[in-house]
Structure formats: structure tokens, C-alpha cells
């Protein structure tokens, strides 16, 4: 069993080292922990699923462990280069790595447990450990964003806690292995609990209409924090939603989750049209992607589930790449306004192409994995609800696609202002987004492996 908890233990161990308050030591410990965590997570792919004691690690859990660990590694690397741009941090830079490690630890903890109550504890812990990361810039807007994040998300998680209590009242257990096989003593109570739990966890995932914290946090947090929030925190919360749907698999519960997903896609696409700030633009793009993933998780169909996981994996790499690049842009142009950022093809040559490709990836352009994931979900939607529903969702996806890519193309290729901005491509800051964009593309070649892990629980 020790192998299954290694990815969780490494960031926790690194956080202990960070208590020494030495920046170089904290940075090195975080880097080592992230490398060991991704190595252990990849090794676990070849092990049998674990459903013993407090662990519940199936195929989906294994994929989540890999994705969280991978983004953990790239975020540590990018942070090492980016933190020098933070002039007046609210916490020391060694404390930044302390909270980053604890944040990752709480996410890895959440996706590995055989108990809905402990899973709730893990997801709640992500709020506690990430609040100061959001506010690290130590200005009025980042502090307000952090405060709003704490209030809204904590309120949502209180709702999910009430839901989990109702699930316990109906099933007399919170162990996932028992919930999957036992029949509820009060089915209506179980449905009510599941709906409340979905509402609560969806708040953390940025699902409409509980999404209002998300644009502010993504808009004002520093780039590596925005990246890790969008690429793995939101999916971790959706993982909690999936566990609720899986253990209370009633049609009414699935339909409720499906409606939340559809509404999120619709409103995120509409919000994207009028965005004037590039980081908020990607925040609404994250909403749209989470909405599509939720649709895939809600539909009881193998194509929908596979599509949701493919979309989740590809989105994690592509969206982290996009947010890393926004950090590079902000460090040069000192503005978040799309109209004031022009011609980055000349100031950030590599960054411009990475930015454009990552935007295409998160918007679902072929041949990226997001395109295939969305295609599977649309196909499952068509099989379940007919052509009208599939076309309706497709229309809003198209709106999102053209809105996002039009704005990104404007940033990349518009005429450079007469007052030239100094070129500032830095090796690490430029290389990490490129690597993640390439990985978002390579996902499409691992669809068979992903399907194998989801169906058998391991690579053979």
C-alpha cells in the first residue's frame, strides 16, 4: 500500500522542509518532491487498483494523480523563474512554496480516499492552503479576490457538507466501496444529499451560477497560481462531483449535474464575447471546459466518460501553458488589458506561438486532445438526448472558440506600437509553456492508454 500514498507524501515532506524559511532550500525541496511525485504517480499506473482501508484508487484516481503531479512539477519550475517579478509579496517566497506544497498535498489526498467525508476534508483543505497564494501580490485587487474566494467557496463547501451528512443518513456509511454496493434506506434523502453535494463541489469547480469567485481569482492571482487553479484545482472539485454521481447514480442526480454543465457552457461562452482582460478571458474559458467535463461525467455513457477524462487531461496542460504565458506577458507589458497588448510575436517570439496554440487547444481545436474529448461528449449527448441538444451545445462551443481565438490572435499579431517593448524571452519562463502545449497535443496519442486505465484500472 505504501506505493499508493507516495505521491501524497512527497509534497507533504517538502512542506515540512519549507518550514526552515530558507528560500533556496524550499525551492529545491519543492522541485525534488514534484519530480518524485510524478515518478510515483506514473509507476502507480502499472499497479492494480486499490480499494482497501482508507484508499480508493481506481483508473480515474490514477489519472488525476498523474495530472496533479505533472502540473505540480511545471508550476514549481515556472514559479522559480517568475517569483522575482513579485516585489512586495504578502508572504515570504519560501512560504509560497510551503503553501504550494500543502495545496498539492490536499488535492492528491482528495482524489485517493475511500470516504466521501475525508474527500470533503481534502477539498476544503485546498481552500485553506491556497488563499494566501491568491493574495501573494499583496495589492487591493488580489486581497479582495482572495477574500471573495474564501467566502464563496467555503459557503459552497458547507452546502456539500450538509449533502454528505444526508447521504450518510440514507446509507449509514460514507465509504465509497460500500456506497457502490449498498441500497439506500431512504432513496429520496440520498438524492437530496447528492444534489446538495454536487452544488457545493461545483462551487469549487467554477460551475454556473456558483462561479463568481473564479474570474476574480484568475484575473488577479499571479500566473503560476492561476495555472494550477485552472488546470488541477477545478478538476479536483469535479472529481468530487463524479464520486457523488457514481455513488448516487439516479437519473435525477445525473440530469441535475448535466443541466449545471450545459448552463455553464452557455453562460461562459456568452461572457467570453465581451472580455477585455486576457486573464479573465481564460477564466471564462476554464468555466466552459469544466462545464463540458461535467456534461461528460453526468451522462451514463462510456464515450461521455472517456471524453470527459481526455478533455480534463488535455485542458490541464493547455490551460496551464496559457496562464504561464499570461505571466510572461504581464511581466513585460504591465497590463491585463487586451487592447494594450499588441504584437507579442516580436516581444515574445516563442511565447506568441505557444500562446496561440494553447488557446486553440483549450478552445477545442483539432488535433488537440480537447477536440477529441469534446467530440466524444457531443456524440454521447446526441445518443442520449438527440440531435437538437448536441447542436445547441456545439453552437455555444463555437462561440467560445471564435471569441477566445480572435482575442488571442489580436494580442499575438496586431501591429506593434511605435514605442517598442523590450524583448524579454527567458529560457525557463518560455520553455515550460511550450512543453505543456506539446503535451496537450500528445494526449491524443494516449487515448488508448487512458481508456485502458479507466476500464481495467491499470496499464497492462
Image (cartoon, rainbow, N blue to C red):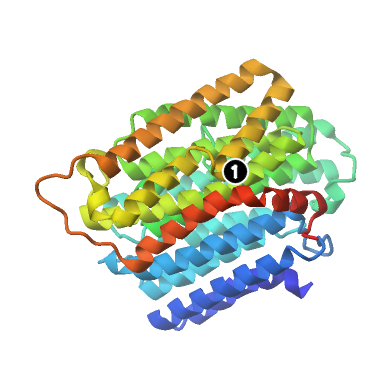
> Does 325 sit left or right of 48 as displayed?
left
User: What is the x, y in percent for residue 363?
Assistant: 48, 38
Q: Secondary structure at mark 1?
A: helix
Does residue 12 appear anywhere in the picture? yes
Image quarter for residue 298? Answer: top right
Q: Nearer the viewer, residue 113 or 200?
A: 113
Locate the C terminus and report the quarter of the image it occupies. Answer: bottom right
Packing grade of label 1 (10 A; few <14, some 14-19, many >=20) is: many
> Does 225 sit left or right of 456 as displayed?
left
User: What is the x, y in percent for residue 309?
Assistant: 65, 45
Position of 59 relative to 245 (above/below): below
Does residue 199 appear anywhere in the picture? no
Who's the residue at 23% across and 52% down the image?
346
User: What is the x, y in percent for residue 243?
Assistant: 72, 46
Position of 315 relative to 31 (above/below): above
State the count of labels.
Answer: 1
Who's the residue at 34% across and 54% down the image?
351
> Does 52 sit left or right of 59 as displayed?
right
User: What is the x, y in percent for residue 416?
Assistant: 17, 45
Position of 25 relative to 220 (above/below): below
Image quarter for residue 35? Answer: bottom right
Position of 434 relative to 387 (above/below): below
Q: Nearer the viewer, residue 216 or 316?
A: 316
Q: Residue lying at the far left in this picture: please name it.
A: 418
> Does 205 sit left or right of 306 as displayed?
left
The residue to which callout 1 is attached is: 311
Locate the N terminus and report the quarter of the image it occupies. Answer: bottom right
Amino acid at each position: 500500500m505504501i506505493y499508493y500514498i507516495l505521491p501524497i507524501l512527497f509534497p507533504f515532506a517538502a512542506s515540512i522542509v519549507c518550514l526552515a524559511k530558507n528560500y533556496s532550500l524550499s525551492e529545491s525541496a519543492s522541485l525534488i518532491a514534484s519530480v518524485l511525485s510524478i515518478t510515483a504517480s506514473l509507476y502507480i499506473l502499472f499497479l492494480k487498483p486499490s480499494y482497501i482501508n482508507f484508499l480508493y484508487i481506481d483508473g480515474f484516481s490514477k489519472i488525476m494523480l498523474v495530472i496533479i503531479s505533472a502540473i505540480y512539477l511545471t508550476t514549481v519550475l515556472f514559479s522559480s523563474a517568475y517569483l522575482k517579478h513579485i516585489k512586495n509579496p504578502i508572504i515570504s517566497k519560501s512560504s509560497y512554496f510551503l503553501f504550494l506544497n500543502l495545496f498539492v498535498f490536499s488535492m492528491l489526498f482528495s482524489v485517493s480516499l475511500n470516504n466521501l467525508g475525508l474527500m470533503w476534508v481534502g477539498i476544503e483543505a485546498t481552500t485553506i492552503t491556497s488563499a494566501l497564494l491568491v493574495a501573494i501580490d499583496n495589492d487591493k485587487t488580489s486581497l479582495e479576490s482572495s477574500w471573495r474566494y474564501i467566502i464563496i467557496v467555503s459557503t459552497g463547501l458547507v452546502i456539500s457538507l450538509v449533502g454528505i451528512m444526508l447521504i450518510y443518513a440514507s446509507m449509514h456509511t460514507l465509504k465509497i466501496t460500500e456506497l457502490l454496493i449498498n441500497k439506500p434506506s431512504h432513496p429520496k434523502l440520498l438524492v437530496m444529499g447528492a444534489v446538495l453535494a454536487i452544488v457545493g463541489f461545483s462551487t469549487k469547480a467554477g460551475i454556473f451560477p456558483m462561479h463568481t469567485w473564479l474570474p476574480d481569482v484568475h484575473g488577479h492571482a499571479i500566473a503560476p497560481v492561476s495555472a494550477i487553479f485552472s488546470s488541477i484545482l477545478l478538476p479536483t472539485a469535479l472529481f468530487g462531483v463524479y464520486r457523488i454521481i457514481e455513488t448516487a447514480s439516479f437519473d435525477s442526480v445525473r440530469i441535475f449535474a448535466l443541466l449545471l454543465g450545459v448552463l455553464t457552457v452557455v453562460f461562459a461562452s456568452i461572457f467570453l464575447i465581451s472580455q477585455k482582460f486576457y486573464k479573465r478571458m481564460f477564466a471564462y474559458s476554464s468555466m466552459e471546459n469544466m462545464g463540458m467535463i461535467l456534461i461528460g461525467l453526468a451522462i451514463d455513457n462510456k464515450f461521455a466518460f472517456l471524453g470527459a477524462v481526455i478533455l480534463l487531461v488535455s485542458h490541464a496542460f493547455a490551460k496551464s501553458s496559457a496562464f504561464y504565458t499570461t505571466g510572461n506577458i504581464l511581466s513585460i507589458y504591465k497590463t491585463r488589458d487586451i487592447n494594450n497588448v499588441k504584437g507579442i510575436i516580436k516581444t515574445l517570439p516563442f511565447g506568441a506561438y505557444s500562446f496561440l496554440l494553447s488557446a486553440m487547444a483549450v478552445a477545442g481545436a483539432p488535433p488537440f486532445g480537447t477536440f477529441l474529448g469534446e467530440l466524444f461528449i457531443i456524440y454521447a449527448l446526441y445518443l442520449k438526448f438527440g440531435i437538437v441538444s448536441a447542436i445547441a451545445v456545439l453552437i455555444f462551443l463555437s462561440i467560445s472558440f471564435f471569441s477566445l481565438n480572435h482575442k488571442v490572435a489580436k494580442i499575438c499579431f496586431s501591429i506593434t506600437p511605435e514605442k517598442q517593448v523590450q524583448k524579454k524571452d527567458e529560457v525557463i519562463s518560455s520553455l515550460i509553456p511550450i512543453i505543456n502545449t506539446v503535451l496537450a497535443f500528445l494526449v491524443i496519442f494516449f487515448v488508448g492508454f487512458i481508456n485502458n486505465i479507466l476500464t481495467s484500472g491499470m496499464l497492462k
